[in-house]
Amino acid sequence: MTSLVGSSSKIIDVMDAGTTMRFLTAYFTLTNQNKILTGTARMKERPIAILADALRTLGAQIDYLEKEGFPPIETKGFLKQQTASLSIPGNISSQYISALMMLAPTLPQGLTLSLTGKIGSVPYIEMTATLMEQFGVKPEINLAEQTIHIAPAAYKTSHVVVEADWSAISYWYGFTALAQVAEITLPNVSSQSLQGDRVIATIMEKLGVRSAFNNNQLILTKQESAAHLVWDFKDCPDLAQTVVPVCAVKGITGEFTGLESLRIKETDRIAALQNEIAKVGATLTEPSTGKWILAPGKIPTSEITIDTYHDHRMAMGFAPWATLINLKINNPSVVNKSYPGFWDDVISVGIKVES
């Protein structure tokens, strides 16, 4: 990210990094830089219109270079703030909201965001606000009125300790849940976290994993699991690719909501999950809008091949099946996006990995 922010190149290729695309779109626009932002073929299918329209309302000039509403885009200028208030849907990617929040204090008039509809991924909005506070800017969030107000302010330098990534930690919960015997110790993990995905500890209590924190370590051990899981993923959608595969092979039925945003991720993650759990006879269906039912399958005796759809979380979410199944994962290098040492860590816990 640092090299992209400071790059002298006009063309910025974010490859498949959606967060980078959204944050840099706001950054380059509101700092009045002429840049072309592009990415992979899949990135060009991921919508950016809600953010681009918001920035245009603020006074920015942004052009779509191929398909309307999608990357690649060109940021062509921001000379004067046209409004101090914006309305933006609350049920879309929180990255749109975070992008506007982080740039808001640099605007002459500041910014008030009104979030319409049901708000998803609230922990990510709150995490953005908390980190901004650490750098001297205090957003005023009123969830009851669904507004975020940020006055003009100058960021200050600060010392920040980057937390362990709870999304990455979640896969070790998956391994613990499915292994016959397991005790996994993860270093430098605090019980106090800003991240919404910290809730994986609560979810996995129901799926057979006990969490213990000791001397800045997280220790995972096995316990009895429930037969059924009910969960709303609206605040933690990335965890679906950890939880669904575990339930699918552990005989746990599920009722899930809050999966809508998975359609616009690195792939259509709902379709990808449906395709891959079907390989063990499991199903994920939507009998009514927004409500999903998981019916588990059975552990096969033959080898299973998992397709990853250019999505790092598909590879890591299904990797715990290797504790039960002779497993092949296509395009395993997709993990490099967020966890390049993943397969080395898998080997370190005694699982044989062949490239």
Image (cartoon, rainbow, N blue to C red):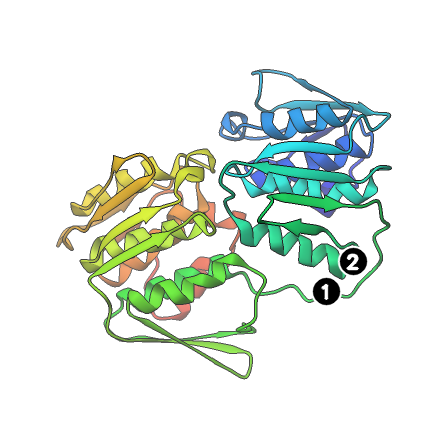
| Marked residue nearer the N-terminal end (1 or 2) | 2
The mark found on residue 135 in the picture is 2
User: Residue placed at 67% from the left, 28% from the top?
Assistant: 54
> Counting other residues with Cα less than 10 Å from the Cα at mark 2, is it few (<14), some (14-19), or many (20 or more)?
some
Measured as percent of width and height from the top left, residue 75 is found at 74, 25
The reply to whether residue 289 is in sight is yes
Give left or right: position of 142 versus 291.
right
Foreground residue among 309 and 164: 164
Disc 1 + disc 2, Cβ < 8 Å: yes
Asked if one can make out residue 346 in the rendered structure from this viewpoint, the answer is no
Query: What secondary structure is marked by label 2?
Result: loop
* Residue drawn at the location 45% of the way across and 49% of the way down: 238
Q: Which quarter of the picture shows residue 137?
A: bottom right
Give above or below for 283 relative to 320: above
Q: Which residue is under mark 1?
A: 160
**Count of labels in the image:** 2
Kindly identify the residue that appears in the image at 31 percent across and 42 percent down: 273
Q: Quadrant of residue 79?
A: top right
Q: Given this view, does label 1 or label 2 mark the residue nearer the observer?
A: 2
The correct choice, above or below, for 226 with respect to 146 in the image is below
Is residue 36 found left or right of 192 in the rendered image? right
Residue at the image position 42 percent from the left and 35 percent from the top? 267
Residue 23 higher or lower than 226, as above or below: above
User: Residue 113's quadrant in the figure?
Assistant: top right
Q: CA distance from mark 1 to mark 2?
A: 9 Å
- The amino acid type of the residue labelled 1 equals Val
Residue 59 spot, x, y in % from top left = 78, 24
Foreground residue, 9 or 115? 115
Under mark 2, the amino acid is Phe
